[in-house]
Image (spheres, rainbow, N blue to C red):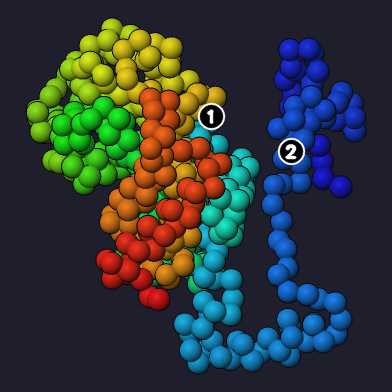
Amino acid sequence: MAAEIVNPRSDSEGRTGHTEQDGGAEPLESFDPAFALHRGGKMAVQATVPLRDRDDLSLAYTPGVAKVCSAIAEQPDLVHDYTWKSSVVAVVTDGTAVLGLGDIGPEASLPVMEGKAILFKQFGGVDAVPLALDCTGVDEIIETVVRLAPSFGGVNLEDISAPRCFEIEQRLQERLDIPVFHDDQHGTAIVSLAALRNAARLSGRTLGELRAVISGAGAAGVAIAKMLVEAGIGDVAVADRKGVVSRDRKDLTPIKQELAAFTNKAGLSGSLEDALAGADVFIGVSGGTVPEPAVASMAKGAFVFAMANPEPEVHPEIAHKYAAVVATGRSDFPNQINNVLAFPGIFAGALQVRASRITEGMKLAAAEALAAVVGDDLAPDYVIPSPFDERVAPAVTAAVAAAARAEGVARR
């Protein structure tokens, strides 16, 4: 029997998380439904073939399985047809950047990775296996994933801290012939672009007419900036803790030097608040709080996407005073920028055509398809569909598969 979860701190009613066995009070799940839901984990392995009798066993395992193994050994591509490889993704983390919790380690990251896996299944029909690695070195992670890769059709990197996440993804893409996708970067960027496309359409403007400011130069901020530039944004500036990332700064990391080279065409410098003056778009992926006067200084009809959780950089009540469209990362406000709108369909589409990688064109196609789901129902409080809209995953899947074929990375 598994041990109860122990929490030495008491809740507001004086109850602790200790178990009866160690002399404590009630287990945590007796007063917190989150613990009750997570007891025993959120997923399990289930057979897809019957094992009713000896004949079934002889087909599923020895001797029948030997025929399939021999065929794959002779024709390696058959692995996609006769194993789960073509429909399963590895969800890989080292536990160094988990949600807003930070570096909490591999074991503590597992509830999130399990959650990611069940979202893959629920929203994209894709099986996924959480793999929390007990290593944080770039080379260690890369070598571990490369050795595990034969079992999977794709790799979703999750909650790996910047700047290591950039190198890990790039080098894995170079080493492997299956899709490798860091969702904290690209999933956030895809959904943000989809919402921004619809916000612009609502206001009768194009992306090329907009100037955006991104708060945060980590994984999500860098990826959003790249995708907005690829999509044709008028201009975008990115701010980190020390201010706007610009070519004249001498303290930039290599990633931020690259960022400065393709952003901030206006040559802005100074603080985030300085950059927001007259800006059309604010995108927050950093946490912290943006002062109300800075929001008020934005252009008329601005868009505020404040995506930090649990506290947005700009509270919606304040944002609505000045912005035409407001989005957050929270489910209790309209226009939730949620990665689950993207990654299940992206992997479903890539796996469907056995893509060797996920290209920029496939990401842009996903954003366009996601934006199109909103259609004629477009409104200030509806620029992005709900994760529970059943049209989302099929639309993204089809668009990604078509883009993979068009870009020559599909293998069927």
Whole-number angstrom distance, CA of label 2 to CA of label 1: 19 Å
Q: Earlier in the sequence, mark 2 or mark 1?
A: 2
Question: Position of 27 compared to 70: left or right?
Answer: right
Q: Could you tell me the amino acid type at mark 1?
A: Ser
Disc 1 designates what residue? 331
> In terms of depth relative to the viewer, which is nearer, 93 or 294?
294
> In terms of depth relative to the viewer, which is nearer, 329 or 398?
398
- Name the residue at 23% across, 15% down: 300
Residue 320 occupies quadrant: top left
Question: Position of 277 compared to 265: left or right?
Answer: right
Q: Is residue 214 above or below residue 86?
A: above
Which residue lies most toward the top here?
293
Q: Is residue 285 visible?
A: yes
Question: Position of 51 compared to 379: left or right?
Answer: right
Helix, strand or loop at disc 1?
Answer: loop
Helix, strand or loop at disc 2?
Answer: helix
For label 2, count other residues whose C-alpha is less than 10 Å away and answer few (under 14), some (14-19) or many (20+): few
Q: Is residue 28 above or below residue 61?
A: above
Mark 2 touching mark 1, by CB under 8 A?
Answer: no
- Name the residue at 50% across, 44% down: 340
> In terms of depth relative to the viewer, which is nearer, 9 or 238?
238
Disc 2 designates what residue? 37
Q: Could you tell me the amino acid type at mark 2?
A: Leu
Residue 130 occupies quadrant: bottom right
Give coordinates of residue 58: x percent, y percent: 78, 87
Give coordinates of residue 226: x percent, y percent: 24, 43
Q: Mark 2, mark 1: which one is toward the viewer?
A: 1
Which residue lies most toward the front here?
376
Q: Which quadrant of the figure contains the C terminus?
A: bottom left
